[in-house]
Image: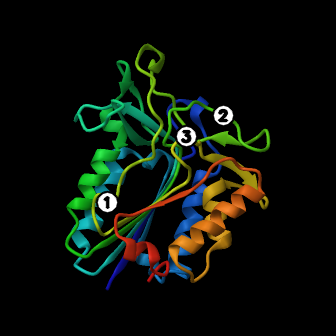
Amino acid sequence: MTKRALCVGINQYLDPSNELRGCRNDAFDMAAFFQIELGITQENVTIILDKLATKANVLSELERLKELSMPGDYLAFSQSSHGTQQFDVSGDEIDLYDEALCYHDTTKLGNGWNPNTITLDDEFRNYCNQLRPNVLFEAWFDSCHSASGLKYLGMSYDKARLMYLPQAELHKKPVPKRMGVNLSPNSILWAACEADDTSADTFLNGKWCGAFTNAFLTTYGPVKRSALLSRIRNKLKEGDYDQVPQLDTVNSELRAMLVGS
């Protein structure tokens, strides 16, 4: 079995008002976690940051990893950035909105986002379903997947990792939901927050980071994923963070496995 990983961290955006502070650190910290704890070799860990973290570049790297992966391989993907929603065009969303991840080049187009600068939940589902049989895909998304609005969590310098949908006030108010990835039976999603939460960009232990990423890394141990999730939630609750991380998979066996197994 070969293990590979992609880590994306985006502090800088074309619109300076959207800039964050902890996403680059998250990417480096997750890369170290993949190498030290999950045994992924340095040459098999790719890091994409800030101006290089466009949708085209990130999806190109994911496609490369997909082509390299053989049955039985493990593929890890972490992204710390803004999240948002976009008007649904495929007709599969009851609330008429898809969830999306934002990139450095995310820009507006009409009343929504330029589709070439965000990645919809539909696109991630398609990606997972195109993986070769028995390739395990595990994703960590430290971003907001809701449209409940910008709010500050805990201390005054915390910022929610959320981009507003352009002119959303002109349309039906979206129902906040998490990014959907797990239609594939061999995929796992760690989401930084619950459906109606936002994900905090915060200052902890002397540096900027994602509150979820920090909680994941500081509570990690060789335990079942479900047990680790409880640790992460307790850590955030102790820190007075409102967000409630989620662990999603349609495969109950994967949920019960040891992390990195």
Tell me, for residue 196, which label it has, or none: 3
Q: For this view, does 37 lie left or right of residue 55?
A: right
Going from the N terminus, do you reach mark 1 or mark 3 first? 1
Quadrant showing the C terminus: bottom left
Tell me which colouring the rendered structure shows: rainbow
| Label 1 – label 3 distance at C-alpha | 28 Å
Q: Residue at x 48, y 84 (%)?
A: 39
Tell me, for residue 62, which label it has, or none: 1
> Which one is closest to the eye, mark 1 or mark 3?
3
Q: Residue at x 74, y 52 (%)?
A: 203
| Label 2 – label 3 distance at C-alpha | 11 Å
Return the x and y of residue 8 as percentages of the image width and height. 47, 56
Q: Amino acid at mark 1?
A: Leu
Return the x and y of residue 111 as percentages of the image width and height. 37, 19
Tell me, for residue 151, which label it has, or none: 2
Q: Amino acid at mark 3?
A: Asp
Q: Secondary structure at mark 3?
A: loop
| Label 2 – label 1 distance at C-alpha | 32 Å
Q: Secondary structure at mark 1?
A: helix
Residue 8 visible in the displayed image: no
Label 2 crowd (10 A; few <14 / some 14-19 / many >=20): some
Q: Secondary structure at mark 2?
A: loop
Given residues 21 and 249, the one toward you in this image is 249
Q: Amino acid at mark 2?
A: Lys
77 over 105 or under it: above or below: below
Label 3 crowd (10 A; few <14 / some 14-19 / many >=20): some
